[in-house]
Image (cartoon, helix red, strand yellow):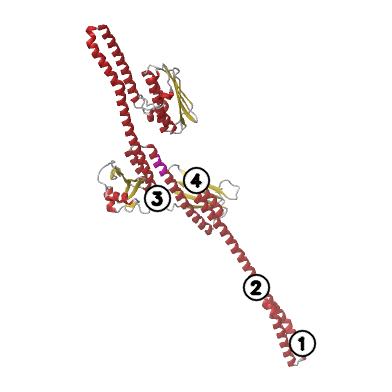
Amino acid sequence: MRFARNILPILIVLVVIAYETLVRRLGNPGGEITAHLLFYGLAGPLATYFTLRWITEGERARQMAEQELRRLYLQLSTQNERLEAVQTLMREVADAPDLETVLQASAQGAVRATGATHARLSLAGLEHSSQVSGTARGSTLLESPSADLHELQVELSTGLPAGVRGRMGQNRTGMMSLYFDAPPTPGTQALAQAIGAEVGSALASAQQRSRDLITLYEVDQSIRAERNMRRLLARVTGNMAERIGAQSRAAYLTDADGLLRLEYAQEGEGEPRRGGAVPSFAVRVGREGVPLIASAQEAAQVLDGAQSALGLPMRGEDGLVGVIVLGSALARAFSGMRVPLLALLASQATLAVRNARAYLHSEEVAIGEERSRIAREIHDGVAQSLAVCAIRLDVVERQIRSDPERAIQDVRAAAALLREQIREVRRSIFALRPIDLERYGLLETVRRYVQDFAEQNNLRSRLSIEGDVTLAPGDEAVMFRILQESLNNVAKHARAGSLDVTLLGGSRVTLSIQDDGQGFDLSQVSGRVSSAGGLGLMQMRERVESRGGSYHIRSVPGQGTRIEAQLPQG
């Protein structure tokens, strides 16, 4: 158009000048008119026609270019919206805390990214449920997809190799179904496949987190619930072996001299064993203090039939506690394994072993203290009374002829003393009788104990249990121990005729024991150790307060005693 505007007028003027000059030179007036008619009648319209045609083609090309630009702009805008939707989807599934949230966020993101009317995602083959799913819908009034919509199915891949899924129990299948008003284009299908891959990776991460949390919870339960060392090691190493697909496991613990000893080992389905030589690989793991993967030769030395082995040190504040070794019959089974999680499990196992050792030590101390108490009680009570009886009977033997009446009185006194000591021995045996709290539970155990105690000591008893009584196992043991000690003190010192025991539930569990005995002065006996139960009043108070409870005693000489202990509800 610029050319036509600037150049054509000049060319037309030059052509006209040239034509007029040529005609005038010919000098033929009759032919001049004919020439003018032919030139201006044909050349003008032809020039106008070709000029307008040229301009029209240029305008058409410009319009086509504008249309192409608009089309490309719309495509870029659509792709940008889809890219933003995919990025939003990736952020949401990355922040999702569990599988259900991942699936729901994925369904909503798939609808935004692809323009589908509905989306449904499902994951089958989970351990704790048959299927987990998530659904979403776009700008449609239909709650669920109708039969005339076009369905596109995309398989959700966890991104794990088949061998790894089979070994770790993760052979799970997932499917994403998208529904469209029109058949999806190849681009939409490719986008759906890309979304399926991203969602599969997010699901694999969520499943991994769930398994890690479950494993940590199971190991934590082992720490809390088990105090027998061999059973503890069996449960902890069993959870770890199941987590990574190991078939064999062994645990080495340090002794008092700091040397490793085989405490527990199990190869495959064989019988557990202990003792034996400590392999050099276990020593090396303990010395270096970091997780190590054994060579094939070292693995065979540690566990029979193992082609690969993983060693995890158990270290505490005081140094090495032990070494855990996990073995597999597969070569290179632990390559690429998530060692940080296993190291954390080994740390929890360290805590479990230290707790079990502390419990065993406390048991040994308690047994020693109980033996000392029984020896002291026999020495101070029964032994001295029997010695007095022996002396009296010796005196009776010398008096039986000279003063038979006095001898009969001494024999009767000795018999009364013996009967009293027999009752004392029976009370001690009753106090030492083992009580199975785990078997019967706190309430039934309290009922049995109060009933048996009243029968043994010729007391009238009344037991009242009200409300919901729920305590942690450790708190139950403390509460029952307080009852046991208090009743033993009633039998030993109170000279009571009746006894009231109340167990009241609520936000705090309250145990109260009321007798009608002779009472005592609290200021004179608060720190004294009980000869019957082994604990003084101060020690019972410390036990209860150490668990967040309270302990109170009210007693007046001649008016009986009331003991009240409270612990928080479990």
- The residue at which mark 1 appears reads as 33
> Residue at the spot x=46%, y=50% of the render?
203
Main SS category, magenta section? helix
Give how far across and how far down residue 5 sits, in percent: 70, 77
Of 84 and 394, which appears nearest the observer?
394
Mark 2 residue type: Gly
What residue range appears in magenta? 215-221
Mark 1 residue type: Ile
- The residue at which mark 3 appears reads as 340
The image's mark for residue 58 is 2
| Disc nearest the viewer among 4 and 2 | 4
- Badge 1 density bin: few <14, some 14–19, many ≥20, Cα 10 Å: few
- The residue at which mark 4 appears reads as 100
Mark 3 residue type: Pro
Q: CA distance from mark 3 to mark 2?
A: 69 Å
Q: Earlier in the sequence, mark 4 or mark 2?
A: 2
Of 368 and 93, which appears nearest the observer?
368
Instruction: Find out whether residue 379 is within the magenta segment.
Output: no
Q: Quadrant of residue 482?
A: top left
Q: CA distance from mark 2 to mark 1?
A: 37 Å
Q: Earlier in the sequence, mark 4 or mark 3?
A: 4
| Left or right of 82, for residue 566 | left
| Disc nearest the viewer among 2 and 1 | 2
> Residue at the spot x=36%, y=44% of the render?
350
Mark 4 residue type: Glu
